[in-house]
């Protein structure tokens, strides 16, 4: 199973500067072909431009989608619209969506089904809070979120799981290797051998090799370190070293 290194740009990136980073990433991958699959998920406003700049070197994904294909949902973007712009993937259930937009597990499951409807692969995010970790409830939380956020019909072809401990996202904090390995092994028992399980949460070039070398870690969902092509290429190289 090839690892997947997915970059989530979040609400970052404007015009020409973003275009330049996509071109730099494409050039870097051409110079040193990766042993991992690469994905970039820019803001929806940049997907079409990034698709043109990538020139097929790597796929693009959205960061969220509405559950409906169309309708009176001002400000929302459907999975079909992402597909039309050039995306083939979409992130659903990211902790920032769950926290700031109050998305429930049921909402996430509906968005995953929408992704499949449009022909997109869904990256379904799960993860515990710091209090849940401290109280020893991590595996219970992960099990509950998997059961409620991943709809029936999920396959290794249409779904990837991303374990992102909420307390590690953007904080610089990272679980120990043993903690990551424990959760990924638990997820593996639930989803089976064929489904890719990514780790996300303050992944950067300095810790990528250790994290990506762990059993049952099939790649990474990367935030800030994916914004600059050179940093992202260093992460991709860490995945290649495992192959």
Image (tube, helix red, strand yellow):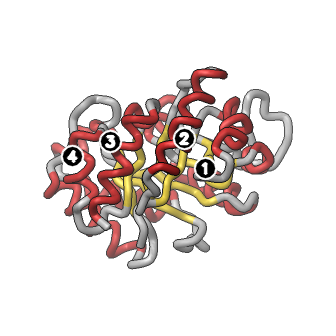
**10 Å neighbourhood of mark 1: few (<14), some, or many (≥20)?**
many
Looking at the image, which residue is at 55% across and 48% down? 91
Query: Any mark on residue 103, and which?
Result: 2
In the image, is residue 26 above or below residue 217? Answer: above
Alpha-carbon span between mark 4 and mark 2: 21 Å
| Residue pointed to by mark 1 | 90
Quick one: label 4 or label 2, which is nearer the N terminus? 2
Task: Residue at the far right: name it.
Answer: 71
Question: Of discs 3 and 4, which sits in the foreground?
Answer: 3
| Residue pointed to by mark 3 | 201
Please report contact status of discs 4 and 1: CB closer than 8 Å, yes or no.
no
Image coords of residue 99 (percent x, y): 45, 33
Q: How many marks?
A: 4
Alpha-carbon span between mark 3 and mark 4: 14 Å
Quick one: label 2 or label 3, which is nearer the N terminus? 2
Alpha-carbon span between mark 1 and mark 2: 16 Å
| Residue pointed to by mark 4 | 133
Label 1, secondary structure: give it: strand
Question: Of discs 2 and 3, which sits in the foreground?
Answer: 3
Question: Of discs 1 and 2, which sits in the foreground?
Answer: 1
């Amino acid at each position: 199973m090839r690892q997947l290194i997915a970059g989530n740009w979040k609400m970052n990136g404007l015009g020409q500067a973003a275009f330049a980073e996509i071109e730099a990433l494409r050039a870097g991958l051409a110079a040193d072909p990766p042993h991992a699959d690469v994905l970039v998920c820019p803001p929806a406003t940049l997907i079409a431009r990034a698709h043109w700049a990538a020139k097929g070197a790597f796929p693009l994904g959205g960061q969220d989608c509405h559950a409906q294909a169309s309708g009176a949902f001002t400000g929302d973007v459907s999975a079909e619209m992402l597909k039309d712009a050039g995306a083939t993937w979409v992130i659903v259930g990211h902790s920032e969506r769950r926290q700031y937009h109050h998305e429930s597990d049921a909402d996430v499951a509906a968005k995953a089904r929408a992704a499949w409807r449009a022909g997109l692969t869904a990256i379904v995010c799960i993860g515990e809070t710091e209090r849940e970790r401290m109280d020893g409830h991590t595996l219970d939380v992960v099990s509950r979120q998997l059961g409620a956020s991943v709809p029936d019909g999920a396959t290794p072809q249409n779904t990837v799981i991303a374990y992102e401990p909420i307390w590690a996202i953007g904080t610089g904090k990272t679980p120990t290797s043993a903690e990551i390995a424990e959760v990924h092994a638990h997820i593996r028992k639930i989803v089976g051998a064929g489904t890719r399980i990514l780790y996300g949460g303050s992944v950067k070039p300095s810790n990528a090799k250790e994290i990506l070398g762990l059993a049952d870690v099939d790649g990474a969902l990367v935030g800030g370190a994916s914004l600059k092509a050179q940093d992202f290429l260093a992460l991709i190289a860490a995945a290649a070293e495992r192959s």
